[in-house]
Amino acid sequence: MPFRYYHGLKVGTSSINENNIMRAIALLLVGVILTFEAGAQTQFGFRYTHKSNLVGIQRKPNPAYWDGVKIPTLAAKEAMDVEYMLQFELNMTILVPAYRFQYKRNCHDFAWAPFMSCMCNTSPPQREAWWMDDPTQNFSDGSMVNVVLSLPKVSTAIGHYEYLKSELSGLPSAYPCISGINSWMGLPVSDLDDLSQKPAHTAILYNWVQSAGNPDIVEGAYFSKWGDFGIYAHLWGPGSTPSGVNGYNGRYHLRIFAPRVNWTPDILFSAWGDSPEIISGY
């Protein structure tokens, strides 16, 4: 495997109860509503693509945050319950739980921020924890390019997304980690049948595993931030990621993006790749 961390992903199939998942999500939303502080201020800002185009982001306190010292709020307790349930219903591993985020951060900001300007002038703590509604400027302006397209799925309702192994095997050497912390930096992956769409989810590809029955076919292993939830390690497809109206499995393809040819980070992009602050949001 090209990446030295695997995080205990369960590669086999898992049974899934969609009703439990939807009930868990509903519980978290109720907790957010019950504990939302009136007048909590939202900050607005921008990240720059490498071609200097602006992408709007916002920063709002996370009602489910818990510092680990005081008594947890109702929202924090419910977030823990939700993630405990999700861990058993879906094939995923919790890396950073939801209550650790003092500010809300979503999947797009988590996965695309390492390839954009940092929010270095934000007041601590967790200065990189922001919410990005639309990351498409990154590839529509050519700052990032689509380097791999997953194999087409026959149905979005079954099966994980898969790739030709030959198309992934060269990525670690082509995009090495600049800091040297890990063997390679990982790349953002979005669910897009074509580049005119806005993705429902973006994750970071960090590894891949053999698909059953064909040595030339693999499926990706990913890190991603699930909306108001935490950061998870997971596979991608029904049984491993949420389905339904607001789920992540509604398209027939995933697309892997990488920096354009001859792209090198300048001072604004010094956290490119695997800075712990960029990746975790702390």
Image (cartoon, helix red, strand yellow):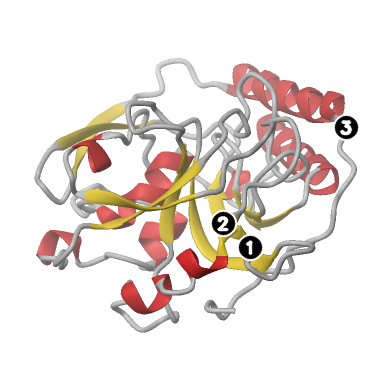
Q: Left or right of 162: which side holds 38?
A: left
Tag 1's secondary structure? strand
Q: Name the residue that disc number 1 marks.
A: 218
Tag 3's secondary structure? loop
Looking at the image, residue 240 lies above or below residue 163:
above
Pinpoint residue 79: horizontal percent, then vertical percent: 70, 37
Pinpoint residue 188: horizontal percent, then vertical percent: 41, 52
Which mark is on residue 17? Answer: 3
Q: Name the residue that disc number 2 marks.
A: 163
Pinpoint residue 71: horizontal percent, then vertical percent: 70, 43
Looking at the image, residue 151 lies above or below residue 227:
below
Q: Left or right of 151: which side holds 235?
A: right
Q: Residue at horizontal 22%, vertical 34%?
A: 55
2 or 3: mark nearer the eye: 2
1 or 3: mark nearer the eye: 1
Three-letter code for the amino acid on which mark 2 is drawn: Tyr
Three-letter code for the amino acid on which mark 1 is drawn: Val
**CB atoms of marks 2 and 1 within 8 Å:** yes
Nearer-N-terminus badge (1/3): 3
